[in-house]
Image (cartoon, rainbow, N blue to C red):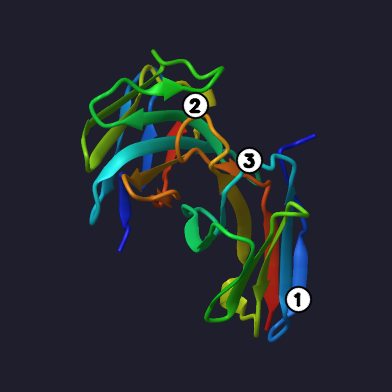
Amino acid sequence: QKEVEQDPGPLSVPEGAIVSLNCTYSNSAFQYFMWYRQYSRKGPELLMYTYSSGNKEDGRFTAQVDKSSKYISLFIRDSQPSDSATYLCAMSGAGGSARQLTFGSGTQLTVLP
Amino acid sequence: GAVVSQHPSWVICKSGTSVKIECRSLDFQATTMFWYRQFPKQSLMLMATSNEGSKATYEQGVEKDKFLINHASLTLSTLTVTSAHPEDSSFYICSASGAAQETQYFGPGTRLLVL
């Protein structure tokens, strides 16, 4: 079993839809949770970063963490074609090398105009 | 803030030559830098972790004599692919993390093609 499981998609939605991206994890020692967006042939871009259970909102993006269920989500409201990318969840803080990230496999999202 | 650059963005070289990729943190001091490799439609694979002024720590299966990493300053790390071969062709991405940061900021990546 992988430490971090992410729905691989691909996911295709119409413009304006609400998108839900999810990851589950098995290591309860993870303390920090991130979502990255990666466009084709580019490096990942940090979208959201949180370290506690609950919701964190930034514009059209909401990150949700439920440590008791070992489950994190990223919601995108009013999705736009420019949101089409691969979304990676990542976690850290479980010991070992400081700040080393454990990634999900990524979900490819396409927002259709 | 938290901008990381990489140079070059792409490189084509002949088999047997060495290629150096630079990674710079532009607006913060990167106490730790990471080098990743990514194959098409796959997630990032960590190659090595380097702390400024120390030797890099390589992940299992990554040849340290093949992939030389230098982290000589708080804003610069380099990855040198020595005696490159076609199987080294890939997308290489660096990331950086500052002393008070628990996350990583990624560079735009370097696409290497070895002929």
Residue B21 percent location from the top left of the image: 32, 36
| Label 3 – label 1 distance at C-alpha | 34 Å
| Label 2 – label 3 distance at C-alpha | 35 Å
Say which residue appears at 23% left-offset and 56% top-offset. B27
Which of the 4 quarters of the picture holds residue B20? top left
Badge 3 marks a residue whose secondary structure is loop
What residue is shown with label 3? A29
Which of the 4 quarters of the picture holds residue B51? top left
Tag 1 or tag 3, which sits nearer the N-term? 1
Identify whether B114 is placed above or below B110: above
What's under tag 1, amino acid-wise? Val
| Circle 2 or circle 3, nearest the eye | 3
Residue B3 is labelled as none
Q: Are marks 1 and 2 on the same chain?
A: no
What residue is shown with label 1? A13
> From the viewer's perspective, is B37 left or right of B30?
right
Q: Chain of mark 1?
A: A
Crowding around mark 1 (Cα neighbors within 10 Å: few <14, some 14 to 19, many 20+) is: some
What's under tag 3, amino acid-wise? Ala
Assign the C terminus of chain A to one quadrant of the image. bottom right
Badge 1 marks a residue whose secondary structure is strand
What residue is shown with label 2? B88
